[in-house]
Image (tube, rainbow, N blue to C red):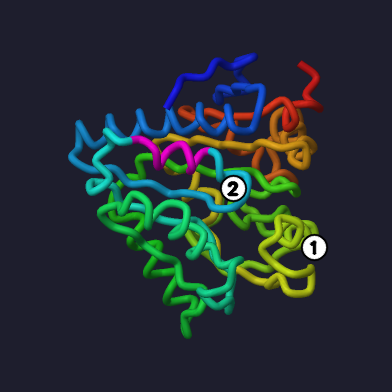
Amino acid sequence: MSQTSALRTFQVDRAVVEIYLSKAEAGRAAALRASAILKTAIAKEGHARLIMATGNSQEDLIGALVEVRDLDWSSLEVFHMDEYINLPETHRGCLKRWMNTHFVEVVQPGKVNYLDGNASDLAAECHRYEQALRAAPITLCMLGIGENGHIAFNDPHVADFQDPLGIKRVGLDERCRKQQAGEGHFTDFASVPSEAVTLTCPILMSSENLICCVPEMRKAEAVKNALEGPVTTQCPGSVVRTHPRACIYLDTDSASLLKA
């Protein structure tokens, strides 16, 4: 994987922000950092634990990461961060299916933990998954920011930076559902599920390292709100900049509304 150079690097609160010419370059740079973090943890601890986002904005990051050949994938434990409720695993919008297709089946990590949105007892499933997550420190969380500012499925109306829960059932707002339909995983807005289970903001932020990859023009408004607005649940992604080891990767499109 070739090294790419940022057009601009700056800091917002505690987070480092890097802007690249293209979506592909931003994804490659994020993947380089992710692989270095995971390699260091495996060399030091013998294992690493990763929470990963899914979806179109993460394709370049994941596509570059799976090309890394000198990472001991067998020492990696993986979690995904959200899942629709009552969506068949065969559906192209299923986030477990996305993670399997783009990542798990390619590198075959040592352990994979799935959040089951079809569980008969969702409260019990959320508790089970939270216990697995909290069993040991999370080395790295790779996340994006949605068009409405969400992280995972913490849309503005359900996001809570002090949430006592690690995982919870949530309703998805209209803008979130429109994004999912627009990304091509569903035939139309009506077919996008209205509920999901998601890791909450505090458990995402508890990761030792954060990589936030947010490319494309459709994310420009959310990026501006996250980096130049207040830290608020009205733009849940704004909390990323309070993490001491966060790096945010943008392309020129997603950074186009920033003042600086």
Does label 2 or label 1 sit earlier along the sequence? 2
Q: Is residue 215 in the magenta section? A: no
Depth check: give the residue in front, 240 or 177.
177
What residue would you read off at disc 2? 161
**Residue at position x 43%, y 60% from top?**
100
Specify the amino acid type for callout 1. Glu
**Residue at position x 36%, y 45% from top?**
138
Q: Main secondary structure of the magenta part?
A: helix
User: What's drawn in magenta, residue-wise?
Assistant: 61-68
Label 1: few (<14), some or many (≥20) within 10 Å?
A: few
Gap between marks 2 and 1, in whole Å? 21 Å
Depth check: give the residue in front, 19 or 230.
19
Label 2: few (<14), some or many (≥20) within 10 Å?
A: some
Depth check: give the residue in front, 99 or 133.
99
What residue would you read off at disc 1? 174
222 to 196, vertically: above or below: above
